[in-house]
Image (cartoon, helix red, strand yellow):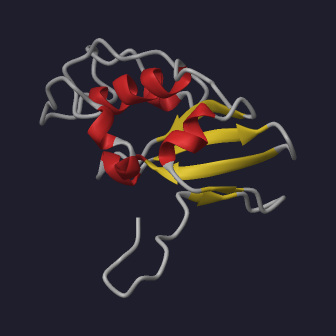
Amino acid sequence: MDDSAGAPSPPFKTCSMCGKVWRSRQDFLADQEIICIGYQPEFQDVELGLFQFNHATCGTTLAISASRFTDLHTGPVFEARLTGTTECPGYCLRQDDLRPCPARCSCAYVREVLDRLVRWEKTG
């Protein structure tokens, strides 16, 4: 998509190691060489947390702000953060734990998005 000046939109992501460019989020997520490996939380603002992906072609890990994927969430967003309470299973504390969280926690929606990213259909 072009802006009003006619300049091309910036790519969704460029690999910091090999320079591969993904023009869109769909292209990035559908790439068979992209593997979602985890989420690094930011507990004060979960949208500032980072989803992490391995680029199998060159072996680098790419981090992308959770805010770039929030539109993939379809359920409720809870206000209270339950990290460290008896209701929290601690998934966010283990970066490579990819399970969705059953807690009614402000972090739970990011876990649901993570689950979608892990299961994204690969076509390219």
**Residue shown at 85% from the left, 41% from the top:** 57
Please tell me which residue lies in front, 99 or 28.
Answer: 28
Instruction: Give the vertical position of 116 relative to 47 (above or below).
Output: above
Name the residue nearer the viewer: 34 or 87: 34
Horizontal relation, residue 44 to residue 96: left or right: left
* Quadrant position of the C terminus in the picture: top right
Residue at 35% across, 51% down: 67
- Residue reaching furthest to the front: 6
**Relative horizontal placement of residue 117, taking residue 13 as reference (left or right):** left
Q: Residue furthest right?
A: 58
Relative horizontal placement of residue 37, taking residue 60 as reference (left or right):
left
Where residue 110 sits: x, y (%)? 35, 33
The answer to which image quadrant residue 75 occupies is top left
Q: Residue at x 66, y 50 (%)?
A: 62
Q: Position of residue 85 (x, y in %)?
A: 28, 22
From the image, which quarter does the N terminus lie in?
A: bottom left
| 111 relative position to 73: left or right | right
**In this orientation, which residue lies closer to the viewer: 107 or 11?**
11
Picture mark count: 0
Q: Is residue 121 above or below residue 109?
A: above
Residue 45 on image: x %, y %: 29, 52
